[in-house]
Image (cartoon, rainbow, N blue to C red):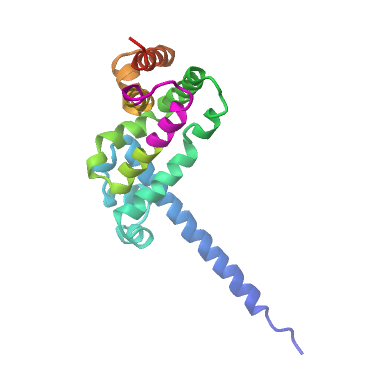
Amino acid sequence: MAAQPDVPASRGYTLRARQERVDQTRLRITEATMRLHEEIGPGATTVSAIAELAGVTRLTVYRHFPDDEALVKACSAHWRGLHPRPDAAAWASVGDPMERLRTALSETYRWARGAEPMMTKIHRDLHVMPEFVSRFLTRDQQSRVEILSEGFRAPGKKSRRLKAALAHAVDFRTWHSLCIAGDLSDDEAANLMLATVAAAIDNT
């Protein structure tokens, strides 16, 4: 009797190949979105432009990402994987609060320089982006400020000033203002922010 074809194995291969094609298409769309967001910003990015750059139809884009939020989430996750922010939890191991801040600013400003094309467009177009983006940025900054504020002797009103100064120091827009608009080096900007934080908790 002739051997019967291995139908289940053949079907499994077909399904895997199909899933690989789906994943590749999804990645092309995600990368096209990321590239357009970096070049022209989320506010100017259209589904038609994404489809053209990814080499797919508009319908294919919508099939993978039914709404703007789903598309932006995929793009954000992919971009963050390529440009991870400094690990704020690691800063907690630095006991001296000013040295911890110096480390944080050095790492944050180095990250900001590499992330500048995307982050400039994100902050510019934040008002037209899905709300989760603004919430994420706010929560991320708050968690970093909490870690950096540990160890400072800043009771009462000084605590409020300290946290305001720290939030300003680690904000991407502060780095952009000082280093892009103001033409300072990352080290110069970091030293200026260290002085700002020191002034916020000065006893005088």
Front residue of 173 and 115: 173
Quadrant assignment, res 157: top left
Residue located farthest toward the right when viewing the structure as drawn:
1
Residue at 35% across, 60% down: 60
Front residue of 46 and 146: 146
Q: Which residues are magenta?
A: 141-159
**Image position of 192 with respect to 13: above or below:** above
Count how many numbered circles sit on residues in the image.
Answer: 0
Quadrant assignment, res 108: top left
* Magenta-span inclusion, residue 150: yes
Left or right placement of residue 84 versus residue 130 in this view: right
Residue located farthest toward the front when viewing the structure as drawn:
156
**Image position of 9 with respect to 41: above or below:** below
Residue located farthest toward the top when viewing the structure as drawn:
204
The picture places residue 73, in percent across and down from the top left corner, at 38, 50
Q: Quadrant of the C terminus?
A: top left
Left or right placement of residue 55 versus residue 147 in this view: left
* Magenta-span inclusion, residue 76: no
**Image position of 51 with respect to 148: above or below:** below
